[in-house]
Structure formats: C-alpha cells, structure tokens
C-alpha cells in the first residue's frame, strides 16, 4: 500500500472516519477495583472537601449496639447545586481543577467510594440553593451509569442533622453497604472501630499534615444511633486529628540541616530537594508512629501541600537500616510533566531516569553533593546507635475515652505491649462507695457517672473529658490489666485508692459550694 511505503509511514496512520464509543457498563467493575485502601479512599474524599474551601471536616461512623452501619464525610465547603452534583457523579468528568487543586482525574469520588461501598450518596447545599442529593450504586453503574435523585426532604433532613458543621453551605458524602463493616462479627465492633480509627487518624494526620498545621479542623467521630440523639451529640466518641509532621523534629540529628539541594532534571529544570536528618532514637510521633522506619526513609513528595508519597527512594538506591534518619521533601511542580507522574490514588509517584540522574548531580549552595547528605545521615545513625538508652517497661496502650493528644504522648514515651487491647475509660453506674471499677475482661476502667460533673466544672463533658483524672488513673492502673491471678494486694490497692478518690470528690464539691456562696 502506498501509505505504508516511504520514510514517514511510522509517524502517521490514515483514518476514514470516527465514532463515539461510550464506556460499557462493565467498566463499573473496573471502577470498583482500583485497589484503594480504606484510609486512602477516605483521604480522597477529604481532598474534595479541601478543594471546596472547607476548613472543618468530620469523618463520622454510624453504628448501633452490635453493628457498624455506615460512614459519612461532612464538610463546610462551598457546596454544590443540582448541576454541580450531576457533574460530580459523572464518571471521568473532567473540569478545570486549577493549579492549586488536589483533584486530578475526575474519578476519585466514585472510584474511592465504590471500592469500599455498594452505594454512594452525595447531599449538598450552597448559599443560593436548597439541599439536593444524588446517589450512585454499583448496580446503577452497570445499568448504563444510572444516577438516582435523592428525595429533597431527606436531603434537607440530613443537612439539618449536621447544622453544627453545615450552616449556609456544605456537603455530605455517605457510604452504605461498606464491605469491611459487613464482615465484622457481632460483638467485634468496638475492636474493629478502635483499630480502623487509629489507622485512619495516622494516615490523615500524615498525608494532610500541612493543611492541619495551617488550621484545617478534621475530626473522626462515632455515633451510636440507638441512643436516639440527632447528629453529633456530647456523648459521641470524638477524635481531633493532629498533624503528624514527618519533618517535625525539635533539633536535627546533624548540625546544618535541613539543607537545600538543587537537582538539574532534564525536562523539568531545577528541582529543589529539602534534605533532613532526624535525631537518632527519636520518640516523636512524626518519626515513630507513621509506619516502618525503613519504609519511611527517602523521598516525601508533595502536590499542592498534600503529601502523596511518604518514603521510598524511587530507584535511586535501596532502603537500608543505616539511612532511617534520612528524609527528603520534594514539592511536585504545578501541572503535568513527563518526568514525575502521580497515580490515581495519590499514593505513589513514578519517576523517569531523568529524575534520579538529576538527584545524583544535585548540590547545595556550597557545592556539597547529595551523596554528602546521605553520608551525614548514615553517620548520625551510627553515632546514635552507640549511645546507651534506658529501656522502659512496655505498657498496655491507652484507648477510647482518653484525649488523643495524651495517647500520642504516652505512645511517644512508653513502648506498647504487643497484642494487648487498649485500656478504655467510660462513665457508668456504680455504688456510691466506688469511684471506679476495673472490667478486666473488656480492658475498661468504669468511672462512677454520679461524680462526672465534679471533674468537668459542673458540665456533662464529652467522651474524652476529665483528662487529668483519667490520665492519672491510667498510670496507676495500667499494670492491673493482662494479669493472670488477681492478688489480694492488688485488690487492697483498689480499695484504698477508691476511698482516697472519693475523699477528693467530697473536697471538690465543698470548694464548688463555697465558690458559689
């Protein structure tokens, strides 16, 4: 054929027409199998909230006495009208995200949600429009990408339930039929939620740490619908997610760091590498509590201040134990490029050899090369390894009912016993002569709810109230859990501690009465 002869045959393929081929309904199955982890999927939803200008976001688990029912993400962003909801629910809908947006491909909301839930509902309102909603299901996508319109009365009722967050505008994303929830056996909900929330808190605290440090309020809450309360009541278990800064050390492990290196990368130009050396044996949460130290060494890529890769050398070298103190922050350039590409889940960055070659040539303002930094990080590790360290006794970790900030400090200061269920604190009915009781089967400290207001300045308080009292009890009682035989001496301690604490309640009440009079 004539068009296959000659030197230019490989550059141009002739066509005789075209036709539009919409996605087959079977694409829905591919959409729901993108490999999203649970924490990664929830983080993708929060990215949308941040893009909508939200400064308050709540991840809300709904449960009853025996089951975990559903999950919602509520924000106070600018919201969407009917047209915006239709666009948001359109698979692959592309819009102008802008250079500072966290969204990229137009599939995150649907792919992240339907990877874990059989039904995705989005309800939203703007300052100019009433509450409206859309729902897509796995079955609906297979039925020619059908999208259902939510009853406006339900949409308004759902918005009203969260009026403490959504005042004039905002969005609620709801997952139903969450597959992970449906596999939880009866009586296992507390254990599942405790572990799931801990992983979620760590992931969000790490990957969104720059936004949290700038004032984003991000909470994780659990509400038992059988309590009869509406929305977020006082008794809701509540965690305020704190930033987990992977570069948040107080003093560097090597003087002169952090240090800026410039890497000449073909196709990108100069790329700035901010090289850090952590202090050896640091117990800070940003070092110890974000995963394996070996896996967390290396590059930390950010896109518009959102962490998109936490560790790894991307082919520059292998992870090695003597480089666990080395972490390098890299801000991805705005816009797409052919050197650094981000996967759809915003979890990993793929680099071409041009990047690693550029890093090999990187130098700081004084002419020191990047390999000097790696040698400094290794030397800091070896110097730290030679220091003797006092080994502290492992403890049963603190759990529900204790303020997250306190739990984080305890984890930084004390090693945890492996495989132990966390110690929880609850307020419950007890005889007047008991301030607390140990439920050793459930690893729970039960506090007498008759005395609750005395430790909350006359108020009811929330799930994480009375932090000083609970922390002191944790330190006193931690070694009473996980034992075999219950010794008489331990019971005697319980008895006189109860007596002394009841005297403190009486003293507290006397002081309050005198202050009022």
Image (cartoon, rainbow, N blue to C red):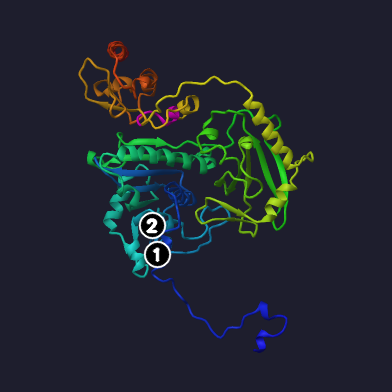
The question of residue 405 being in magenta is answered with yes
Determine the secondary structure under disc 1. helix
Residue 507 in which image quadrant: top left
Q: Which residue is mark 1?
A: 28
Q: Nearer the viewer, residue 412 or 92?
A: 412
Q: Nearer the viewer, residue 65 or 395?
A: 395
The C terminus, quarter of image:
top left
Is the Cβ of the residue at disc 1 closer than 8 Å to that at disc 2? yes
Q: Callout 1 environment at 10 Å: few (<14), some (14 to 19), or many (20+)? A: many
Q: Which residue is mark 2?
A: 114
Determine the secondary structure under disc 2. helix
Say which label, 1 or 2, has the lower sequence index: 1
- Could you tell me residue 42's position as x and y percent? 43, 48
Q: CA distance from mark 1 to mark 2?
A: 9 Å
Up the image or down, 431 lies above or below 222; here it is: above
Q: Which residues are magenta?
A: 400-407
- Could you tell me residue 40's position as x and y percent? 46, 49
Q: Callout 2 environment at 10 Å: few (<14), some (14 to 19), or many (20+)? A: many
Q: How many marks can you see?
A: 2
Residue 256 in which image quadrant: top right
- Could you tell me residue 90's position as x and y percent? 42, 64
């Amino acid at each position: 054929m004539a068009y296959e002869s000659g030197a230019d045959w490989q550059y141009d393929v002739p066509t005789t027409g075209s036709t539009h081929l919409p996605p087959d309904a079977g694409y829905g199955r591919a959409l729901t199998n993108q490999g999203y982890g649970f924490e990664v999927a929830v983080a993708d939803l929060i990215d949308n909230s941040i893009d909508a200008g939200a400064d308050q976001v709540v991840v809300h688990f709904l449960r009853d006495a025996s089951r975990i029912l559903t999950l919602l993400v509520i924000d106070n962003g600018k919201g969407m009208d009917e047209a915006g909801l239709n666009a948001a629910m359109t698979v692959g809908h592309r819009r102008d995200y802008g250079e500072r947006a966290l969204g990229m491909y137009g599939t995150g909301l649907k792919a992240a949600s339907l990877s874990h839930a059989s039904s995705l509902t989005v309800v939203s309102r703007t300052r100019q429009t009433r509450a409206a909603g859309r729902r897509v299901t796995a079955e609906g996508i297979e039925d020619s990408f059908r999208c259902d319109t939510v009853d406006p009365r339900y949409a308004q009722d759902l918005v009203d339930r969260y009026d403490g967050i959504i005042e004039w505008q905002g969005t609620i994303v709801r997952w139903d039929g969450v597959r992970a929830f449906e596999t939880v056996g009866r009586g296992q909900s507390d254990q599942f939620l405790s572990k799931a929330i801990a992983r979620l808190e760590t992931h969000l605290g790490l990957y969104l740490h720059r936004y949290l440090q700038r004032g984003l309020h991000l909470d994780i809450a659990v509400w038992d619908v059988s309590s009869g309360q509406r929305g977020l009541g006082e008794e809701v278990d509540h965690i305020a997610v704190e930033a987990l800064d992977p570069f948040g050390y107080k003093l560097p492990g090597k003087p002169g760091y952090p240090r800026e290196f410039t890497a000449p990368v073909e196709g990108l130009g100069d790329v700035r590498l901010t090289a850090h050396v952590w202090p050896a044996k640091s117990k800070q949460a940003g070092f110890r509590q974000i995963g394996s130290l070996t896996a967390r060494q290396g590059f930390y890529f950010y896109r518009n201040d959102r962490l998109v890769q936490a560790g790894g050398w991307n082919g520059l070298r292998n992870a090695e134990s003597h480089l666990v103190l080395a972490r390098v922050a890299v801000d991805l350039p705005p816009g797409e490029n052919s050197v650094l590409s981000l996967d759809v889940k915003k979890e990993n960055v793929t680099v071409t050899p041009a990047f690693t070659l550029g890093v090999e040539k990187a130098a700081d303002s004084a002419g020191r090369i990047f390999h000097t930094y790696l040698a400094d990080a290794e030397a800091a590790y070896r110097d730290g390894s030679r220091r003797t360290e006092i080994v502290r006794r492992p403890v049963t970790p603190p759990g529900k009912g204790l303020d997250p900030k306190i739990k984080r400090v305890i984890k930084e200061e004390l090693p945890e016993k492996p495989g132990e269920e966390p110690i929880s604190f609850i307020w419950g009915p007890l005889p007047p002569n008991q301030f607390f009781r140990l439920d050793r089967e459930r690893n729970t400290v039960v506090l007498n709810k008759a005395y609750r207001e005395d430790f909350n300045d006359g108020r009811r308080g929330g799930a994480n109230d009375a932090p000083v009292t609970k922390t002191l009890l944790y330190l006193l009682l931690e070694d009473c859990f996980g034992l075999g035989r219950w010794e008489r001496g331990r019971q005697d301690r319980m008895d006189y501690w109860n007596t002394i604490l009841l005297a403190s309640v009486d003293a507290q009440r006397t002081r309050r009465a005198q202050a009022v009079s």
